[in-house]
Amino acid sequence: MEKYPDELLRGVVNRDMLNSEGTASVSLFKFEINPDRNDAHQTEEMSINWCDDRDKAMSIAMNQTNRDGTLQFKAGVAFLSKYTLDIIKKSRAC
């Protein structure tokens, strides 16, 4: 079994992906079609960064830009523990 870091992060494109307390809502983890893919793999996807190095992962996400040069994750990043992810994966909804 592969060993993953204890934490992962997801970039937050806009505040609509956060709840009223400012924490990640379910919409932040919604799989979507990537319109930039032009190969045969037009499936729903979602990008996360495993935090082997938390500072580096955050730096990469916070400096990621769109094609027009604007920052992609204007609302910041959300961190999720692998422990929490493992619990969620075992739920009936998943």
Image (cartoon, rainbow, N blue to C red):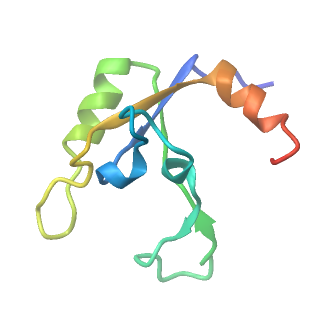
Task: Work out which residue is located at the far front of the displayed protein and give it.
Answer: 20
Question: Where is residue 54 shown, x and y percent of the image?
Answer: 37, 19
Question: Where is residue 80 shown, x and y percent of the image?
Answer: 53, 27
Quadrant of the rendered image containing residue 2 = top right
Quadrant of the rendered image containing residue 10 = top left
| Rendered residue at 44%/78% (across/down) | 35
Q: Nearer the viewer, residue 82 or 23?
A: 23
| Rendered residue at 30%/53% (across/down) | 14
Question: Where is residue 42 shown, x and y percent of the image?
Answer: 60, 78
| Count of numbered tags | 0
Q: Nearer the viewer, residue 12 or 2?
A: 12
Q: Looking at the picture, does residue 27 appear above or below residue 35?
A: above
Q: Quadrant of the N terminus?
A: top right
| Rendered residue at 57%/47% (across/down) | 26
Q: Nearer the viewer, residue 49 or 30?
A: 30
Task: Work out which residue is located at the far left of the displayed protein and give it.
Answer: 69
Relative side of 91 to 69, left or right: right
Relative side of 71 to 22, left or right: left
Relative side of 50 to 92, left or right: left
Question: Where is residue 33 shown, x and y percent of the image?
Answer: 54, 73
Q: Nearer the viewer, residue 18 or 13?
A: 18
